[in-house]
Image: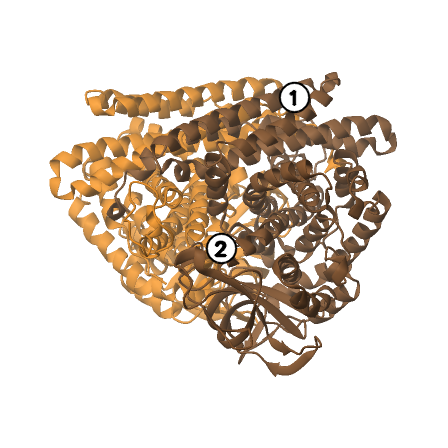
Chain colours: A orange, B brown
Amino acid sequence: MIGYRAPLADMQFLLRDVFNVEKLFASMPDTSGVTDDLVSAILEGAGKISEDMLSPINQSGDNEGCHYQKGVVTTPKGFREAYAAYAAGGWTGLTGEVRYGGQGMPKVLSAMIEEMIFGANSSFALYTILTTGATLTLNQHGDDRLKQTYLPKMYSGEWSGSMCLTEPHAGTDLGMLRTRAQPHVDGSYRITGTKIFITAGEHDLTENIIHLVLAKLPDAPEGPKGISLFLVPKIIVDTAGNLAGHRNGVECGSIEHKMGIHASATCVLNFNDATGFLVGELNQGLSNMFTMMNYERLSMGLQGNGLAESSYQIAAAYAKERVQGKGAGALKSGKESGDPIIVHPDVRRMLLTMRANILAGRALSLYVSSQLDQVKFHPDLAVRKRAEQLVALLVPVQKAYCTDRGFESCVLGQQILGGHGYIAEWGLEQNVRDARIAQIYEGTNGIQALDLAGRKTVRCEAELMQVLFEDIETFLEDGQADKRLVPYIKHMHTSKRLLSQATQSLLAAARVNPDAVGAASYAYMELMGLTLYSYMWLRMICAAQRAVNSNPENANYYDSLLKIGDFFYARLLPRAGALVSEIEAGPNAIMAPGIEQF
Amino acid sequence: MIGYRAPLADMQFLLRDVFNVEKLFASMPDTSGVTDDLVSAILEGAGKISEDMLSPINQSGDNEGCHYQKGVVTTPKGFREAYAAYAAGGWTGLTGEVRYGGQGMPKVLSAMIEEMIFGANSSFALYTILTTGATLTLNQHGDDRLKQTYLPKMYSGEWSGSMCLTEPHAGTDLGMLRTRAQPHVDGSYRITGTKIFITAGEHDLTENIIHLVLAKLPDAPEGPKGISLFLVPKIIVDTAGNLAGHRNGVECGSIEHKMGIHASATCVLNFNDATGFLVGELNQGLSNMFTMMNYERLSMGLQGNGLAESSYQIAAAYAKERVQGKGAGALKSGKESGDPIIVHPDVRRMLLTMRANILAGRALSLYVSSQLDQVKFHPDLAVRKRAEQLVALLVPVQKAYCTDRGFESCVLGQQILGGHGYIAEWGLEQNVRDARIAQIYEGTNGIQALDLAGRKTVRCEAELMQVLFEDIETFLEDGQADKRLVPYIKHMHTSKRLLSQATQSLLAAARVNPDAVGAASYAYMELMGLTLYSYMWLRMICAAQRAVNSNPENANYYDSLLKIGDFFYARLLPRAGALVSEIEAGPNAIMAPGIEQF
């Protein structure tokens, strides 16, 4: 098995040459200290942890899995030590609020770190991002006393967090949840109910776990409008913010046996008169939870991309080493013993598909992250508003499209190794199993697609897409001076035209048939994803063409990016036409069969 | 978990209404006794075994896996008993040569049985099809004494078989294999070498295992032309055909830990001066093995389809039961509590994609099987020749396209269940893991695509495709009388035109660039697969339209087929255009990056 290597060169290319984040950070007071040098230093540190500490316990963690006994969950060998070191290094509070002991770093930076950690060890990464998600929510909606009590120890890594949404009969439709919150005389609540699929709901990595739990008051309105959000610590915390020593009424009933992420504990949590504290307003729980969703969903796309990168590294190394058959054309060596399989065009097709999608997925994730940073840090309201609109449009696409492409890359990586990809030894089958969940959790990709096509497109008459198009137009105008970009700009215009055409068709169909949105949504999300990857490749090609001249000692690297970009346009973009046809086919064929005909 | 149900109605529809196999069997002396009634009875028997005996030990077999200790392999609980019952029922010799105790049944029949067994329990199925493959090879190429000695006990299920091809450094490129065969004075050989990835290479289901092994004589020509085929029994057999009681020099060194098919033992076999007997001519081993390949590869496509069917059954049942959210359009119930998720268009998209591809994949498998039966049984040489050509063209497509679509269906089924699809309980994640191998073994799908685009297309100037087109034309001419078929016939013409266009482009590119075949091969295989599915759907729609009138009590079933067919044409066929673009893009973008740029 080949260990994970942090793709620092690719990340630096995107951060500096493509997105020029130093300039962006300089324009916002709270991030003005985040220079390229600081970014490099932090990324190198995270890379080292990923390579030296997390990658080595990835396969062993998968083999061993988590253990459950009478409510106690034990993580696999090495996870406790790794988590302690991770916390000691200050990584758990990287993006946290400065006032409560966080480091206030931008999302652009933490996104790259998350990609690395997911790529090196997805199970481990989940413990960290759930805590980040919980602190985000708490910081945004909790009162100052709650924040004072809980945030510092969560940022320091002493305590961790979990998000308790799903119940046995309520997944996508949280309005159906049954967990109850009974007001208590002291102003707290007593929480009772069962939550399932709770990632990091119980484990031995931290001395306390802070659960954020959705529940309903007895007299709450029906459905999603009656949901409130509560903070429920595993161990009761005293007024001074120290462990009171006794357990709260929450217990882990079991952990799931699942396809992958074996070292991540997926828990059934039973709340039985557990003491909880209201976070935010009553009955605003769902919308409060949703402010955090954009961050968590972005993390899932990063998981897809990180595992794809890991699989690419292993598959590319194997393809250069493994001798099998002889090349037919340009790259044949003429050796009697055969050639490495990387000379075979179909092996290259798989590797280039992986690499083209990994780079575009990483660029898209950074593009969204930079918008999140502008929403949070930018002093100009108009900029914040525009960034907010882009975040709303892009997050469901980044989540669904990057996880789909990530899974596809993991499957392709496995395919390149043939039988060796199917056995556990090389780690590629684990990547496939670990990547699969990212398409499902934090809202299935079908739900993301529906969010994009419905709320983010039809409901606003594609207003958000216009914001994206303006951004693209601005970029195109800047780029037109460079003659070498002409063919790529032509591709971009075609992509935009196809997306516009499909959007008009969707809007028209939705006016007459309420099933039109759901019938078109998945293909529409894929078309949007492909169009965004096309945009990202245009930006990367533009930057690589500048850099190939200005940075001749790395010319070979930038030249490789230009070639991968060409592959993207020649071989991956053509699918857009088919997606438009699928969208334009409308809902009739999908809705025709009666339920009993399935 | 929902147990597997044999899809007998669908199978009967294909056998009777679409392919009219009774008429075909009646036209060939050796199969003239195979009536529709006999077929029904046998399929029902196989269905019962699949449902009652094999499906119940599928999940437990996955959990337990095979055990290895000091060369001994033990299968999971229940497998021995099931195999004994399976053999006692006469299933192991179903298609065997009558002269040696087989039942001489056609492939059309056994293909459907294999699909069921793979769908119910893929690990179990592998033990049976490896034996079938070995008997086929032995029957076709062995001398009469070998056949007399080994075939009857293999047909009876007392002994099983394995195929030993792959070595650590020789997978796709068998010319590199190093296992040696030393001639012995008594006319036998002494085999020495290591084979890996040997399915059913060692286990406790039968008292003997008959290995068919590829090896080279010391003075054999280099490469694939120096490979010979040997029969190597695990336990030496005396001249009377009974176990001599002592072990041959073959030992299982270990079994693989792999992604799925855990109950199937994948073995490292060490041959150390093992006694072997030549099968067929010296140095003809590879081509002798290839006569069996068409059968084995067909089995892999059936595995993909069988597991897809299993996943469809579970996902459809779940989608009808699981209440989550409210329908937006045609199927909304207006119930406050919500609707079953099958009312949501995106869930239907997934179910219909699965069902449309399962039906077409099954039809394609039967279409190929009926050609195999004609090759074997038809008295008319011209018919045999034509069937042989179709088999050559279709087998790589059926293997690769049905396993790709099968895996896709298993992934979609898992997606429909959301988080419940990711945990082990429902069996869908096992189906994904078990289906994945079918895209890899018996020649990876990339190799199938290369076989199709190279040997079966470019090398013969698309002569085989013309045979297929003639078959389609004949069918179209018959169908044109029926006005209702006009739109479907139009689709078929479009499909044919696109395939022709892509083929001409491929032929032209291959003349000037030897990398053109490999660069186009995968998209070309997919285009051929999609075109064949289009042809199969045309035939199914044609049959369903006849039957909806002639068989009114089943009108609802036939009507469902018509609707699924409409879905196929509206939503799945549009991808053909994108595939043509990929093919026409040529090899440049794929071959441009230098090896060091990966």
Determine the residue positioned at 67% across, 34% down: B343
Q: Residue at x 69, y 49 (%)?
A: B111
Viewer-closest of B228 and A26: B228
Disc sitting over residue B489 in the figure:
1
Query: How much space separates mark 1 and mark 2, taking CA atoms?
Result: 42 Å
Q: Is residue A17 left or right of residue A358?
A: left
Q: Quadrant of residue B236?
A: bottom right
Closer to viewer: mark 1 or mark 2: 1
Q: Pinpoint residue A73: horizontal percent, then vertical percent.
A: 50, 68
Badge 1 amino acid: Ile
Q: Is residue A3 above or below residue B233?
A: above
Q: Secondary structure at mark 2?
A: helix
Mark 1 vs 2: CB contact within 8 A? no
Instruction: Report how many numbered discs are placed on residues in the image.
Output: 2
User: Does the image show residue B380?
Assistant: yes
Q: Quadrant of residue A30?
A: top left
Residue B417 at x, y percent in the picture: 61, 47
Residue wearing tag 2: A433
Residue type highlighted by circle 2: Arg
Q: 10 Å neighbourhood of mark 1: few (<14), some, or many (≥20)?
A: some
Q: Quadrant of the N terminus of chain B?
A: bottom right
Which x, y percent locates residue A551? 13, 39
Of B126 and A112, which appears nearest the observer?
B126
- The subunit carrying tag 2 is A
In this picture, residue B424 sits left or right of residue B153: left
Give the answer, above or below, for where A479 lies relative to B190: above
Left or right: where does residue B373 sit relative to residue A73?
right
Res A465 quadrant in image:
top left
Query: What is the residue that sits farthest to the bottom in this orientation?
Result: B246
Q: Secondary structure at mark 1?
A: helix
